[in-house]
Amino acid sequence: MAKSEFFHEININLPTHEYKIHIGKACLSNVDLLNGYLAGTQVLIVTNTTVAPLYLLEIQRAFSSIQCDVVVLPDGEVYKNQHSLNQIFDTLITHHHHRDTTLFALGGGVIGDITGFAASTYHRGVRFIQLPTTLLAQVDASVGGKTAINHPLGKNMIGSFYQPHAVIMDVNTLQSLPEREFRAGLAEIIKYGLLESRAFFKRVHDDLQQNLLSNPPLLADLVAHCCEIKAKIVQEDERELGKRALLNLGHTFAHALEAYTKYERWLHGEAVGIGLYCAALLSQRMGYLSEIDLHSLDKLLQLAQLPRRIPKDINLDKLMQLMFHDKKILQNKLRFVLLRAPGDCFVESKVSHEELHQSLISAQEGE
Ligand SMILES: NC(=O)c1ccc[n+]([C@@H]2O[C@H](COP(=O)([O-])OP(=O)(O)OC[C@H]3O[C@@H](n4cnc5c(N)ncnc54)[C@H](O)[C@@H]3O)[C@@H](O)[C@H]2O)c1
């Protein structure tokens, strides 16, 4: 078995809860680390049919001397639902898991969100540990304590704010991730570049020119920096009453594009790629962002091989209607995160319909 190596440890300090994010390689098989986080002597690992054959066994081994149950869900966003949640509860109840059980979420954001939600409600809240295995889950979904399932009438409509007890990330798991999923995760990293600073934006550009997967310390460094950026924002505004809204940069566009195409055309990160370009274009049209910065973002998205333009077949009026259904609407005003420069983002609620429409036209393929 490969020896665990840890590159980073990040502390998250929230008013009511503190926890660590461990980032390393081969660390999912670290018996001492995993056992150190147990609340008692019962464990439930939640994973899916794709991830289980890859990593489940090494985690089960760590718990060979205690009660360790497993729920293997079917793979896919469509299974982030009430039925899967009940499967988790059924297993917990039929195997007599007590209040001091510990849930492990082994997989991408879907598994993390549903396991976190189960943990937040079983016995009014039990301990859970995130073991994120996608790039998107490592830099985004596993950090910050948002948990949810989907409802047939809307994505992430039922959920809670519930922080994990720890997050353990093994960058080696990204080796088995399909390339398209890896690139989708890069969109969120580019978003952090825009949120953080011109220097980090440039560093993301430099790192993406390397083969990140063949350089675990470099990849771990990049992941760690993104987690730190998200952690800093979440620490200031855990419940998204203010600053946390900045994390939605590009997402009002992305959510509308995903809903328009019934979540079938793009991975979330791919829709975020287009969304980031749209947000930057709108910022530039409104006189906040320079042409040069818009162009640099476009080049970076291209380097990450992400989609950047709204396809021609998308009807922009219908897309705008969907944007007005976004659950981030406050007092009937659509709020956009806009940019003055990398590292200088802000929430703007005074975007006119006309300005938005013209930006979408400019962001469409062939314009
Ligand atoms: N809670 C939050 O703050 C937050 C933030 C962003 C996204 N999300 C949620 O996260 C979900 C998207 O997460 P995601 O992009 O990780 O998608 P996902 O969980 O569907 O994983 C993507 C695919 O990769 C597979 N996979 C996972 N790890 C693998 C590995 N190491 N090797 C091979 N295949 C692997 C999965 O089985 C799946 O097919 C959405 O439901 C979204 O709502 C939550």
Image: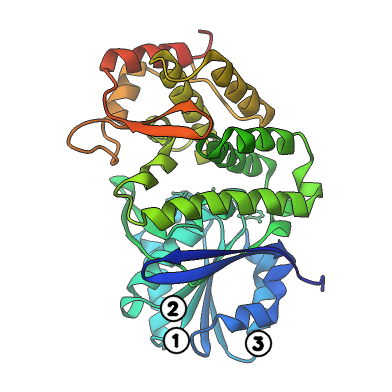
Whether the residues at callouts 1 and 3 have beta carbons within 8 Å, the answer is no
Circle on res. 64: 3
Query: x, y percentage for residue 84?
Result: 41, 64
Which one is in front, 245 or 323? 245
Q: How crowded is the residue under tag 2: few (<14 C-alpha within 10 Å), some, or many (20+)?
A: some
Residue pictured at 37% horizontal, 63% vertical: 83
User: Is disc 1 placed on a helix, strand or loop?
Assistant: loop
Quadrant in which residue 362 is drawn: top left
Circle on res. 267: none
According to the picture, the residue beneath numbered tag 1 turns out to be 95
For the rendered model, the colour scheme is: rainbow
Figure quadrant of the N terminus: bottom right
Query: x, y percentage for residue 292?
Result: 58, 16
Query: x, y percentage for residue 4?
Result: 76, 70
Which one is in front, 11 or 118? 11
Q: Amino acid at mark 1?
A: His
Whether the residues at callouts 2 and 1 have beta carbons within 8 Å, the answer is yes
Residue pictured at 50% horizontal, 38% vertical: 195
Q: Is residue 265 visible?
A: no
First along the sequence among labels 1 and 3: 3
Left of 367 or right of it: where is 210?
right
Above or below residue 179? Residue 144 is below
Above or below residue 184? Residue 256 is above
Q: Amino acid at mark 2?
A: Thr
User: Is disc 2 placed on a helix, strand or loop?
Assistant: helix
Residue pictured at 48% horizontal, 36% vertical: 264
Residue at disc 3, CB closer than 8 Å to ligand 1: no
Left of 10 or right of it: where is 316?
left
According to the picture, the residue beneath numbered tag 2 turns out to be 91
* Residue at the top extreme, as displayed: 367
